[in-house]
Structures are given as C-alpha cells and as structure tokens.
Amino acid sequence: MTSVCLVLGDQLSESLTSLKAFNKENDVVLLCEVQEEATYVKHHPKKIAFLFSAMRHFAEHLMQQGFTVRYVKFDDPDNSGSLAGEVRRAIAAIPANKVIVTEPGEYRLLHAFKSWPDTLGIAIDILPDTRFLCGIDKFKHWAKGKKQLRLEFFYREMRKQYSILMEDNGKPTGGKWNFDKENRKPPLKGMASPKRISHNQSAITLAVLKLVHERFHNHFGTLEPFHFAVTREQALQELHHFIDNLLPQFGDYQDAMVVGEPYLYHSLISSYLNAGLLLPLEICLLAEAAYRSGKAPLNATEGFIRQILGWREYVRGIYWLHMPDYAQLNFFDAKRPLPNFYWTADTRLFCLAETIRHTRDHAYSHHIQRLMVTGNFALLAGINITEICEWYLLVYADAYEWVELPNTLGMALFADGGIIASKPYAASGKYIHKMSNFCQYCQYDPMQTLGEKACPFNALYWDFLARHEDKLQTNQRLTFMYAHWHKQTPEQQAAIREQAAFTFQKMDTGNL
Ligand code: FAD
Ligand code: DLZ
Ligand code: SF4
C-alpha cells in the first residue's frame, strides 16, 4: 500500500504523527501552496510569505532526511488551487491508495478531510496532533461534568502532569500557582524594545517574497521589511535570544504598551510555534531552566509558561469542545459593521491607530494590544462578531482558527457568554492610559468622559454596561461597576449615553 502523507502549512515538524507513520520505501509527502488556503481569508502578506518560505525550507529538510517529497508551488501551472485537488492529482500520479494526515487546526478542514473517502474515493487516516500537550480527548475528559472550565484549574493540572515549576513535595515552585499580580507594571518613561535578531534572506525566501508581492499585493498589510525566521534552526535562535535576553523583563512589562514599540519584551514565537517550527514542551523546559539557573525571575518564568502550557492548550481545548456551534455565538447580539479604520488606521483614537499600524506593518501586535485596544473597542462598540473574528484571523501571522476564535470571540468579545472569561474584558480609556504612553499623543483626554475632548472609550464603557445590564447584572465581578453606575443621577447617565451615541454617529459616518 502506498500513502500520500499530506503535511499542511502549519504542520512543519518532523515530530508529526503523520510523518512518524511514514514508510520511506513507498510513501510520498505532499506539501502544496494552494489558492484556497491562501485566500479563504485574505491573509496578511507577511503570513503567506512566512508560511510558503517555511514550507519550502521544510520540504528541503525532509528530502535531506530521505523522505520522498512532492512539493507543489503556488505558481505551478498545473496547481489545482485546493488541497483536495492536489491530493487527487498526487494519488493519480504516484499512484497511491491512502492519505495520511495529522488532524488539522481548523474545523472546516477536518470536516472536509472526513468527506474525502466519498468525494475523492480514497481512504484517509486522520492521526492525533501530538505537538500539543493536551490531546483533544484528554481536554474533553477534563471538561466533562464541570460547570465552569476555568483556565486556572486546567493550568494547575498541566503543571502537575508535566512537572513544570513543581517542587518534590507536590507544591508549586514559589508557593503559588500564579504570579500574575506582579506582571502588570506600566511602561517606564522612554522604555524601548531591546534589539531583536534578524535572519538573512535565503534564495527561497527571496523567490517567495517576489511571488507574494505579485500575487497578494491587494491583501491588508506590508510585506517588507521581512524578518521572520523560516527554518527550525532560525526559530530556535529566536527562542534562545528571548530566553537569554528578554525573559527576565517579560513578566514585569507583559501588559505595557509603548508608541513605536510593538514587541517590547514579548517572545515573538507564536508564529513559529503554531506552524510547528518550535514545540511547546521544549519552550517551557528552556524557560524553567533559565529560572532554575538564576537567569530569570519566577514571576516572568511562571507568567510565560502559563501562556504556553496553560492558555494555549486551554483555548485549543475549548475550540474543539464547542465547534462548530462556537463560531455562531453572539451573547450581546453585536452587529455594528466593522469600521473602515481597522483597515486604514485612519482614526483619531491614537491607541487604535497605533495598534492597527503595528498590525499592518508587522502582522503582529502583542496580547494586550489585541485584547484591550482593538478587542476592547470592538466589544464596547458591539462590532459584528463574524467580521471582527475574520479581521483577527487574517491580520496576524500566528492566526489559525483554533487559537484565534476562542481568543477573539471568547476572551475579547465575551460572545460565548462566559465560557472562557468570567467577565467581559471591558475597560475605559483610563486602563489604556495607565498601561501605555499612547494617550500623550492623542487629541482626547482619558480622564474626561463628557465633552469634545473626552476619550471615546469612557462613555462607550458605561454605555456598554448600561446596554447589557439585563445580561450582566448578576455577574458578581461587575457588582462594583454597576453600583458606581447606579450612583449617577438619571441626568448624568443620560449625558454619558448621549456622548456614546455621538461617538457611534461619528463611527457610522466614518468620522471617528
Ligand atoms: P508572548 O506574549 O511572548 O507569549 C508567549 C506565547 O504564549 C505565545 O507565543 C503564544 O504561543 C502563547 N500565548 C500567549 N497568550 C495566549 C493566548 N491567549 N492564547 C493562546 N496562546 C497564547 N495567539 C495566537 O497564537 N494566534 C492568534 O490568532 C491569536 N489571536 C488572538 C486574538 C485576540 C483577540 C487576543 C486577545 C489574543 C490572541 N492570541 C493569539 C494570543 C496572544 O495575543 C498571542 O499568542 C501573542 O500575542 C503572540 O505573541 P508572542 O509570541 O510575542 O507572545
Ligand atoms: C495559512 C495557510 C496559507 C496561507 N497557505 C497554505 C497553503 O498554501 N498550503 C497549506 O497546506 N496550508 C496553508 N496555510 C495553513 C492552513 O490554512 C492551515 O493548515 C489550516 O488553516 C489549519 O490550521
Ligand atoms: Fe485611546 Fe482614549 Fe488614550 Fe486616546 S485618550 S489614546 S482614545 S485611550
């Protein structure tokens, strides 16, 4: 029996179950750059360039390891434009009688793969993705019978299971599971990102950049300069650079935001991790080793490990537990069209403009900018869930639906009604003012709620709480905020809501 081993663009790891099942005597690895995957949403050009270059380098690597590889380039005249089409062509050309694939990261593809025995007339083995530290079945088992699926408890289980930051007596290192309270320092005056490493562009990358420039110039985002790692070796250099030079400050300034500084002390590894160039356990072990050898403090190390061992595995579990229904959830019935400034950065709200500029130029912005600026605004303004989720899926180089959707729909927009978050991450301009230096450059004043100079986030925040009081009033974590709102006189409340209505009017007419 000869098999085609289909390796997707975000499965670039030799540890893949489908490659472990590979028989070097007969089987053929198939990697293909296809129109359908590159355009099912109009991905940022940097994301396409990163993946195509990483795919081509990975194919070369596999061939050096003795794998037979069929690689279909985007501009191959016979390229059918879809994964199904390329599998069909490969089966006929080899010829082969089975497809092996590791489970994909998106529900739409899993659904498609399951239909291939009928539509392509070929057997398919879909193997588990063991690159993750919590298998889908294991997560479902953990979730079974629980009323609430809180990250904190999942994370503790993962720490115990992998013995990470654990002491011999079974207690967490440092006596606490979570050091988050120490990880919320505002930026220091004049704080700038330490220098990041960059990589020489190989002939493969140069060819890909030319292709992407020619074929995807109408997608949102700038292609060059292009500094991404595109091989495992380069991704490991990025990881070591982070652990050795940036991890010590990661915790303190994890939530800080600074003008012109998209990266600060963040690791920038999500694109590599999600595409398979790095593996989660090696990252956590390296971070723990840095702590144990005195090179990084515990608050930073625990905070960083929690993102990978905790949040990343947890959101994937939530995705597969609740799909396909999850994508349809809309707790607040949000339906206002996505404002055009999400594409142009042309808005007077400086924090939004700056975050969108980072996104456009780097296919990156860090977590707090995604959550508390673009996400917070979309939540407060009641932006259409499908439109904003699609925006997040296409603008970031690390975005795949398994991780993007729970973060956007669940964490940022609370559209799942609290499956992920115990309360909406709604905040006024005062939070952004505290955690960034953005407001200094803005025509609005974060301390004012009413009047021409008032920061639009402030009235929107109160209007959001008032608008959704029926759904949120029983949430105990909001009791204090509702008490504050009810202390306002009816006249004060009406003035705030009028101010919010004025912002909506400006937004709807493209003048915000
Ligand atoms: P660091 O801040 O250095 O964190 C280290 C690693 O932890 C990241 O590389 C990532 O792998 C992991 N991590 C951190 N937070 C999360 C999280 N909430 N969920 C999953 N993993 C996490 N992350 C994606 O990988 N892809 C996405 O499409 C994505 N979309 C998001 C959308 C919204 C609205 C929000 C609020 C967050 C989203 N995130 C997404 C999570 C997070 O913002 C990114 O993982 C992070 O910004 C990547 O940058 P970094 O590698 O420098 O991360
Ligand atoms: C994101 C992406 C892009 C832009 N292009 C391809 C491609 O041409 N071929 C491919 O195999 N994968 C690509 N991908 C990644 C897939 O979209 C990804 O595997 C699925 O979304 C599942 O996570
Ligand atoms: Fe953003 Fe308001 Fe600050 Fe302006 S004043 S940057 S709109 S938070």
Image (cartoon, rainbow, N blue to C red):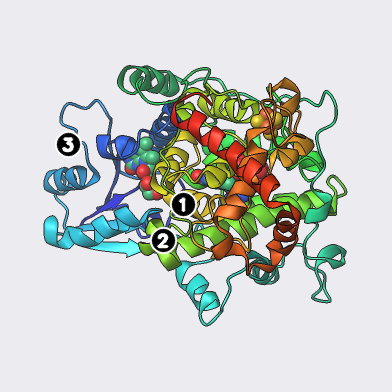
The kind of secondary structure element at disc 3 is loop
Quadrant containing ligand 2: top left
**Percent of width and height locating residue 48:** 40, 31
Judge whether 85 appears above or below 79 on screen. Answer: below
Circle 2: is it few (<14), some (14-19), or many (20+) Cα within 10 Å? some
Query: What amino acid is found at the position of numbered circle 2 in the picture?
Result: Tyr
Seen from the viewer's position, the closer of residues 312 and 101 is 312
**Percent of width and height locating residue 396:** 50, 36
Labels 1 and 2 touching (C-beta < 8 A): yes
Position of residue 89 in the picture relative to residue 46 (left or right): left
Judge whether 315 appears above or below 168 on screen. Answer: above
N-terminal of the pair, mark 1 or mark 2, is 2
Query: Which residue is labeled 1 in the image?
Result: 405
Query: What amino acid is found at the position of numbered circle 1 in the picture?
Result: Leu
Asked if ligand 1 lies within 8 A of label 2, the reply is no
Asked if ligand 2 lies within 8 A of label 3, the reply is no
**Percent of width and height locating residue 504:** 51, 36
Position of residue 149 in the picture relative to residue 43 (left or right): right
Query: Which residue is labeled 2 in the image?
Result: 326
CA gap between label 2 and label 3 equals 31 Å
Q: Give the quadrant of residue 252.
A: top right
Query: Which residue is labeled 3 in the image?
Result: 80
Is residue 301 at all visible to an observer of this figure?
yes
The kind of secondary structure element at disc 2 is helix
